[in-house]
Image (tube, rainbow, N blue to C red):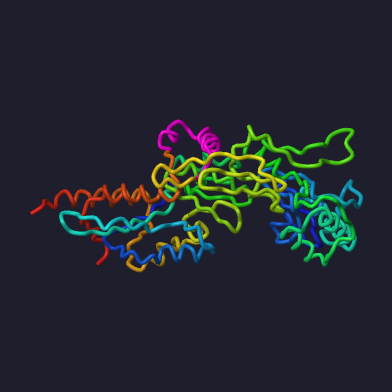
Amino acid sequence: MSIYYIYQDQKRCIGCYACEVHCKTKNCLAIGPRFCRIIQVGPKHVRGIPRLNFVFMPCFHCEKPWCVSACPTGAMQKRAKDGIVFIDSSLCVGCKSCITACPWGVPQWDRNSGKAVKCDYCKDRIDKGLKPACVTKCTAHALRWMSAEEASELKRQQYAQELAKEPA
Amino acid sequence: MVSLKIDGKDVRAAEGATVLEAALQEGIHIPTLCYHKAPGPQGLCRLCIVEAEGPGLRRTILPSCNLTALEGLKIDTASPLIQSIRKTIVELLMANTPASESLLSIAKSLGVESSRFTSVQKDPCILCGLCVKVCRNSIGAAALSLADGGSGSRVVASRVVIDAEACIGCGTCANICPVQAIRIEDSQTDRNIILYGQVVNKMELVKCEQCGQAHATQKFISSVLSRLTPEQKTAFRNLCPECSRVIHAESLTGQIPPDSHCGNYG
């Protein structure tokens, strides 16, 4: 896994899609490919109350990425220094193996270039000490850029708090 | 690193890089149709010719995709001689082929409006062999080959032929063809591979187990699976990319404790 993590606080997310818009703008994406996605789930009834969830889905930058294994040309790579999974587009022949292999449907098809494209955590911005476009422009501050360690710590704390909150 | 001069500009290139790559990296445009970095250079379309001169090399015309960037090389990518030869190459390609978009755009950039030559072939294929090379070297299927070449032949090749049994129906050939001579047409159930206007292979498409949309051929899925590790294979599901995302998002919301509050924002 990459040393970074984008944490989404679903309580704060209002489903405004600013993350998707700014991702597309920053990465100059035409109609079609979307690197990160807000997926609306629901409304579902939770304890009798209708609830709508917005799940933020960027690439997870897996430890052992399916897409990297599947790529026959070596275009799909994992950056050694921080584990970011990215595509060297000059090597991509557009076979779509990565798109078929990824269990989460992360790699996208760019019809204009005839190549696969994907979220690279805006690595050019990261290298300049900035945060990815989606995090930077999240209107509700629901997205947070953190290390993978911080993320697991945060999630554990949250879960503990939830357990302590006994139903009345 | 090696140092060379391209169009009078000092250029540093990585050891083993080609002149075409070195030029691209410096933003110097050299036209080409058959070059792709993944399967490697071929030197078949001849559009990327340059004039090269250097230690131990007298002034020669060579395709830059096949020419290694060596220390002290002097390269001219658009000298009057190169421009004139390149124009003739474009005219010859245009004579053989009803103009494809990419060829027309190169012709336009060189100021070529029509061809002085005529030929009987009326198919966009320029026999550059990129599809053959990608199918063999990158995809590993080796379903395409150039026919009627070899010793004793009076032509380099007459056409591209397909071995339908070896074809996995990935569509990379159609995607990579610089002149759109190969086409893929998908129906609700089948994938048709069209070469020289004829359906040369028809393969059944597998349906996404969630939405039922046809998305890939079984042979292609098997080829992708063959490159995955055993652990990765077990997580593989026959889903279209869109369904993969949505199903995962739903499973995530099912697991998240309800009403948890982060408390890190005031």
Residue A127 x %, y %:
51, 58
Looking at the rendered image, the quarter that the C terminus of chain B falls into is: bottom left
Q: Count the marks.
A: 0
Which residue sits at x=55%, y=46%? A96
- Is residue B106 visible in this depiction of the protein? yes
Q: Viewed as shown, does residue A58 lie left or right of B147?
A: left
Residue A119 x %, y %:
48, 54
Q: Viewed as shown, does residue A86 lie left or right of B127?
A: left
Residue B234 x %, y %:
41, 33
Which residue sits at x=70%, y=52%? B178
Residue lying furthest left: A168
User: What secondary structure predominates along the stretch shown in magenta?
Assistant: helix
Q: Viewed as shown, does residue B144 lie left or right of B158?
A: left
- Is residue A3 visible in this depiction of the protein? no
Q: Is residue A18 above or below residue B238?
A: below
Residue lying furthest top: B230
Residue B223 shown in magenta: yes
Residue B68 x %, y %:
78, 46
What segment carries the magenta color? B215-236
Q: Nearer the viewer, residue B55 or B162?
A: B162
**In the rendered image, which quarter is residue A139 located in?**
bottom left
Q: Nearer the viewer, residue B259 or A163?
A: B259
Residue lying furthest right: B58
Q: Is residue A25 above or below residue B185?
A: below
Q: Nearer the viewer, residue A67 or A144?
A: A67
Residue B14 shown in magenta: no
